[in-house]
Image (tube, rainbow, N blue to C red):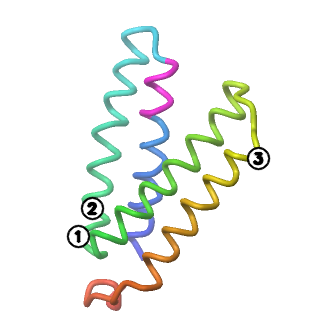
């Protein structure tokens, strides 16, 4: 269960550094962006110690992508197009499909 916390925190940090690349304009905001980069990968590694790496990676990427789109729309007034939702749905469907067809590992069944 703790691995899911690490994974969620990693995805939030992922959204943080991607957003920072778009918005950073002072040394402090660039430093915060760098901290988010290190945190996102470090937290994902913590999750991967207790979950299968493929599970961690596909969920990390999916949550990061969805979170980044959400921040772009809410904070930066990016337009929300039907095609954006369609691509996100395709991504989430692919993630679910990979999880459904994958064989459970010993790590997955232990968490």
Quick check: 32 left or right of 45? right
Q: How far apart are labels 1 and 2 at the CA level?
A: 5 Å
Q: Earlier in the sequence, mark 3 or mark 2?
A: 2
Q: Secondary structure at mark 3?
A: helix
State the residue position of label 1. Answer: 49
Which of the image's four quarters has the N terminus?
A: bottom left
Q: What range is drawn magenta here?
A: 17-23
Which of the image's four quarters has the C terminus?
A: bottom left
Using a 10 Å C-alpha cutoff, classify the residue at mark 3 as few (fewer than 14 neighbours), some (14 to 19) or many (20 or more).
few
> Contact, CB < 8 Å: mark 1 with mark 2?
yes
**Which quadrant would residue 71 be assigned to in this image?**
top right
- Foreground disc of the pair 3, 2: 3
Q: Position of residue 21 (x, y in %)?
A: 43, 24
Q: How far apart are labels 3 and 2 at the CA level?
A: 36 Å
Q: Looking at the picture, does residue 6 appear above or below residue 85?
A: below
Instruction: Using the image, tell me which numbered label, if any, was put on residue 82.
Output: 3
- The residue at the point 52 percent across, 74 percent down is 96
- The residue at the point 46 percent across, 16 percent down is 24
State the residue position of label 2. Answer: 46
Q: Position of residue 10 (x, y in %)?
A: 40, 52
């Amino acid at each position: 269960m703790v691995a899911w916390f690490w994974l969620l925190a990693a995805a939030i940090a992922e959204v943080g550094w991607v957003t920072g690349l778009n918005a950073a304009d002072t040394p402090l905001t660039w430093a915060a962006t760098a901290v988010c980069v290190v945190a996102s990968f470090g937290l994902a590694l913590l999750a991967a110690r207790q979950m299968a790496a493929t599970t961690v990676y596909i969920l990390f990427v999916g949550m990061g992508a969805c979170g980044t789109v959400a921040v772009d729309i809410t904070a930066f007034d990016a337009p929300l197009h039907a095609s954006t939702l369609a691509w996100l749905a395709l991504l989430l469907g692919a993630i679910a499909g990979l999880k459904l067809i994958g064989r459970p590992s010993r790590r997955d069944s232990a968490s």
